[in-house]
Image: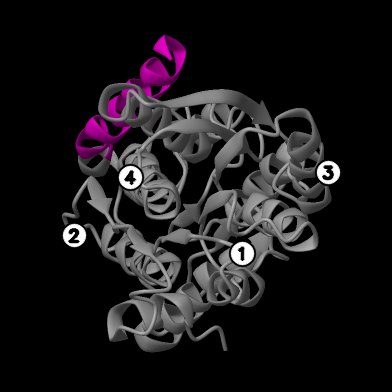
Amino acid sequence: MTILKSMTRRALMGIAGAAMMTSMMPAASFAQDVTIPIIVKDTTSFYWQIVLAGARQAGKDLGVNVPELGAQSESDINGQISILENAVAGSPAAVVISPTEFKALGKPIDEAAKSVPIIGIDSGADSQAFTSFLTTDNVQGGRIAADGLAAAIKEATGKEEGEVAIITSLPGVGSLDQRREGFLDQMKTKYPGITVVVDRFADGQATTGLNMMTDLITANPNIVGVFASNLIMAQGVGQAIAENKLGDKIKVIGFDSDEKTVGFLKEGVLAGLVVQDPYRMGYDGVKTALAVSKGEKVETFVDTGANLVTQANMTEPKMDALLNPKVN
């Protein structure tokens, strides 16, 4: 827990140091054709496709060329580093990036920022070079997940008690580490009757989440709840719950959404989804990058928000818009 808090502090320190970077960065000379690449963790995931859709629309609205870049898997750290280096070599006006891994992307981002402004979205890195950072408060997102899971368990059993698990997609990812931190802290301080008996990391694959949850069902028959802390894990864990028809017995809170997980929510396979605003991250990331490249002052940190969506509120206009974003 101490390491995670330290990581969070370093990420925030990087944001705090960004104001100095802004004043040091020369304004881009403005040709008609401004290029601002966006680099995501995984171009195949629905979550990142929403981010890219937001960035694409910003490009259209602002008259900016926005190359959509990223590896094929969130675990491809070296691939993202190479993509960043190649993007910077093209001398863009700025770069928008969501780092795949906190420590590994620190130095590459430091180096990139010597040439162009770097706007961070979604996940932090061990760097003080971000000019601006737009993300969900992921520690708070983890707390929201803990509250949602406790409420679902109480609704099913009449009490906030029992054994629960958390399954994290990958170790060392800033946003996921912070969600884990918030979840564990909230459970410890607010729900003394609930015990986290399983705290595991996967390898970024939905099938691994499926297999881990299937094993948990057998090895931990007293489990009453699970937090699957990103979309990929929510898909895998949800599939295991659906196949074993355990939606009434084991309550699952996922993070982020797509057609499959929204279907699970409607069917009662998942008890809730903590939903971010990835479209806004992509759109405002490009908008902020353009402003910085013009020499304009921007906020160093922007919280894009998170909401708990359940069967009870999923048809409300705000929640419906978050669950069904426009990706074209």
Q: Main secondary structure of the magenta part?
A: helix
Label 4 or label 1, whichever comes before in sequence order: 4
* Residue 36 left/right relative to 213: left
Residue at mark 2 to residue at mark 1: CA–CA distance: 47 Å
The circle on residue 296 is 2
Q: Which residue is mark 1?
A: 269
Which quadrant of the view contains residue 127? top left
Is residue 228 located in the magenta-colored stretch of the structure? no
Residue 245 versus residue 180 in the image, above or below: below
Say few, some or many: other residues with alpha carbon within 10 Å of mark 4 (under 14 / 14 to 19 / 20 or more). some
User: Could you say which disc has been placed on residue 211 in the image?
Assistant: 3
Query: Which element type, helix, strand or loop, lies under badge 1?
Result: loop
State the SS at label 3: helix
Instruction: Please count the marks in the image.
Output: 4
Q: Is residue 187 visible?
A: yes
Magenta span covers which residues? Answer: 1-21
Left or right: 81, with 157 as reference point: right
Given the image, on which type of amino acid does mark 2 rest? Glu
- Between marks 2 and 4, how big is the CA–CA gap? 40 Å
Q: Nearer the viewer, mark 2 or mark 3?
A: 3
Q: In the picture, residue 197 is in which quadrant?
A: top right
* x, y percent for residue 35: 50, 69
The residues bearing labels 2 and 3 have C-alpha atoms spaced at a distance of 49 Å
